[in-house]
Image: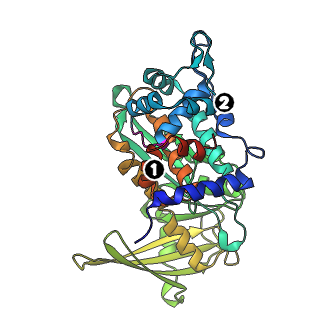
């Protein structure tokens, strides 16, 4: 019987502490990063430093808190050494460190600069991603959006967040609030502007982002793209479908089982020179044959894509993996919905819903960086002892 995922966390933490890549001497720690967030409060009467309140909230979410009430309860139960580790100052009148109340956390998150918070969390996670080199380790970055269905601002304004997630590590490198008067397309470039070191990265997205402006932007940053071509790009899809695919040999075949179905994927790749899409170097055809294991029903779907990668830069099997791994971002959304009950959250005031989504990204990323495979098990492990959240966030 496999070991519980939570049992893997202590040895993973030991490795994390021993790894010089994440040492406080070389990269900023979480408290240093959080200090970059502007404090929206009037300095008169501020009792708790911004970094203290934010760090305690991060620890509470990493211990499984799914609401601001639960965050406040975790902070109220936190032992004195937790306050010491997050840098809380003793109260000069009481000669002890005073805990911030749940109302303090609620008011602060409602007014926090969501863009600044996402930037510092993304930077902290990026500093701790493992380095990989070589053609076989092409870095994939998935861009996709998610609505916070349970959260609404004034006048029922729905919050929709666009995120960039690294395929292999599952770490969220950037997140941006799409806003009420715009859409994901206009936020694509501002989102990736906050991602450092994009050169050589392969950005994947759904058909909505198959836009020439996006491709030009990625080329300017020396990055690559794999774009899915559907009906929203008819002038591009038509020549793709008309390529002599029957004459092109099969270049890859994979099988997989999951979500109650079995799937066979067949891939063909062709070099192109005259497609009307910036940087297009190869066309990709993927045929997906899916069989429902319960009903036996089989469906076949053909997907077309265009990439700026050349045949020398990536093999067909790598294309297939990059396209498939794009949907790891859906795994993030699933964890936030099922484990953190994000869609059921009733947090509605100001920027608090977005801030809580950012803390969930941080908690999931910290656990994954430490080697945890089961996020729910990791949260349960953290809920039993305040020390693991401190260690995972580098505060101990």
Which one is in front, 173 or 19? Answer: 19
Decide whether the magenta segment is chiefly helix, strand or loop: loop
Res. 259 visible in picture: yes
Would residue 207 be visible to someone looking at this image? no
Out of 49 and 39, give the one closest to the viewer: 49
Left or right of 342 in this view: 391: right
Left or right: residue 334 compared with residue 274? left
Q: Residue furthest left?
A: 295
Asked which secondary structure carries label 1, the reply is helix
Q: Nearer the viewer, residue 69 or 279?
A: 69
**Label total for image:** 2
Q: Quadrant of the C terminus?
A: top right
| Crowding near the residue tagged with mark 2, few <14, some 14–19, many ≥20 C-alpha atoms within 10 Å | some
Observer-side mark, 2 or 1, equals 1
Q: Quadrant of the N terminus?
A: bottom left
**Image spot of residue 94 (x, y percent):** 56, 12
Residue 363 highlighted magenta (yes or no): no
Q: Which residue is mark 2?
A: 35
Residue furthest right as drawn: 25
Q: x, y percentage for residue 97?
A: 57, 21
Q: Position of residue 243 (x, y in %)?
A: 52, 80
Above or below, 153 against 270 in this view is above
Residue that appears at 59% across and 65% down: 276
x 52%, y 60%: residue: 8
Q: Position of residue 85 (x, y in %)?
A: 62, 34
Please determine whether, in this image, residue 31 is positioned above or below residue 268.
above
Q: Which mark is residue 315?
A: none
Q: Which residues are magenta?
A: 62-66
Spatial CA span between label 2 and label 1: 28 Å
The secondary structure type at the circle numbered 2 is loop
* Disc on the earlier residue, 2 or 1: 2
Q: Which numbered circle lies on residue 381?
A: 1
């Amino acid at each position: 019987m496999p070991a519980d995922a939570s049992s893997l966390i202590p040895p993973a933490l030991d490795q994390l502490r021993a790894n010089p890549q994440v040492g406080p001497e070389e990269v900023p720690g979480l408290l240093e990063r959080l200090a970059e967030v502007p404090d929206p409060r009037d300095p008169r009467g501020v009792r708790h430093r911004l970094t203290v309140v934010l760090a305690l909230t991060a620890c509470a979410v990493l211990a499984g808190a799914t609401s601001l009430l639960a965050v406040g309860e975790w902070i109220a139960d936190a032992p004195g050494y937790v306050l010491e580790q997050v840098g809380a100052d003793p109260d000069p009148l009481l000669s002890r460190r005073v805990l911030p109340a749940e109302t303090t956390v609620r008011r602060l998150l409602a007014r926090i600069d969501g863009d600044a918070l996402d930037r510092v969390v993304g930077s902290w996670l990026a500093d701790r991603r493992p380095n990989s080199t070589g053609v076989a380790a092409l870095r994939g970055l998935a861009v996709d959006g998610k609505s916070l269905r349970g959260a609404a601002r004034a006048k029922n304004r729905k919050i929709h967040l666009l995120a960039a997630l690294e395929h292999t590590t599952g770490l969220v490198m950037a997140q941006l609030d799409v806003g009420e008067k715009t859409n994901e397309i206009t936020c694509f470039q501002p989102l990736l502007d906050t991602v450092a070191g994009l050169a050589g990265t392969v950005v994947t997205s759904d058909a909505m982002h198959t836009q020439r402006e996006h491709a030009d932007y990625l080329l300017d940053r020396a990055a690559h793209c794999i774009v899915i071509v559907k009906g929203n790009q008819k002038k591009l899809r038509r020549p793709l479908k008309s390529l002599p695919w029957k004459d092109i040999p099969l270049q890859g075949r994979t099988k997989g089982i999951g979500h109650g179905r079995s799937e066979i994927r067949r891939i063909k790749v062709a070099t192109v020179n005259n497609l009307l899409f910036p940087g297009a170097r190869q066309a990709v055809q993927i045929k997906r044959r899916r069989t429902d294991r319960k009903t036996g029903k089989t469906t076949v779907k053909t997907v077309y894509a265009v990439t700026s990668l050349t045949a020398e830069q990536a093999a067909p099997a790598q294309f297939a993996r990059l396209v498939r791994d794009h949907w790891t971002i859906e795994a993030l959304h699933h964890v936030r919905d099922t484990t953190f009950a994000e869609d059921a959250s009733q947090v509605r005031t100001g920027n608090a819903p977005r801030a809580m989504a950012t803390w969930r990204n941080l908690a999931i990323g910290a656990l994954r960086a430490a080697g945890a495979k089961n996020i729910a098990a990791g949260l349960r492990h953290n809920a039993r002892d305040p020390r693991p959240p401190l260690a995972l966030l580098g505060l101990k």
